[in-house]
């Protein structure tokens, strides 16, 4: 588990921050506030990479409110390149293929 102090220190020392599968599990209030703190400290100091399967409209449900979500997205989306990958999940495709192979 990441503590506030270690997350803050990590952001100050890093040039790249990776937030993988953001939104897979909703944040607690403290977790959303920690995310905001990390994103705010990293803002224009590091290069963030965020992976998620959620559209921006769904983020308030994960981050616990529109105000905090707006502040997080404002910092994450300033001077950003958004790469959207649509299509079949490779994990699901591989699982289906393995299932077919075991039945054959």
Image (cartoon, rainbow, N blue to C red):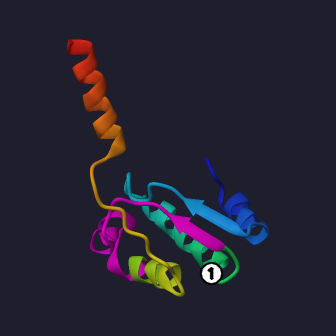
Nearer to the camera, 96 or 14: 96
Asked if one can make out residue 38 in the rendered structure from this viewpoint, the answer is no
Left or right: 35 with respect to 17?
left
**Number of numbered tags placed on the structure image:** 1
For label 1, the residue is 43
Left or right: 21 with respect to 5?
left
**Residue drawn at 27 percent across, 18 percent down:** 101
Asked if one can make out residue 99 in the rendered structure from this viewpoint, the answer is yes
**Residue drawn at 63 percent across, 65 percent down:** 17
Nearer to the camera, 66 or 92: 92
Q: Tag 1, which secondary structure?
A: loop
Nearer to the camera, 81 or 73: 81
**Residue drawn at 50 percent across, 63 percent down:** 30
Left or right: 26 with respect to 38?
left
Image quarter of the C terminus: top left
Q: Is residue 10 magenta?
A: no
Q: Does the magenta stretch include residue 63?
A: yes
Residue 54 image point, x, y percent: 32, 63
Image quadrant of residue 98?
top left
Residue 69 image point, x, y percent: 40, 76
Q: Give the range drawn in magenta.
A: 47-68
Residue 75 image point, x, y percent: 52, 83
Image quadrant of residue 26?
bottom left
């Amino acid at each position: 588990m990441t503590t506030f102090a270690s997350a803050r220190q990590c952001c100050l020392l890093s040039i790249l921050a990776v937030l993988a599968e953001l939104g897979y599990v909703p944040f607690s209030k403290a977790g959303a506030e920690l995310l905001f703190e990390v994103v705010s400290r990293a803002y224009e100091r590091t290069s963030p990479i965020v992976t998620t399967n959620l559209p921006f409209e769904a983020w308030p449900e994960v981050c616990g409110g529109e105000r905090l979500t707006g502040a997080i997205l404002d910092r994450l989306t300033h001077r950003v390149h958004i790469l959207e990958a649509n299509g079949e999940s490779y994990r699901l495709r591989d699982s289906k293929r393995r299932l077919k192979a075991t039945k054959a």
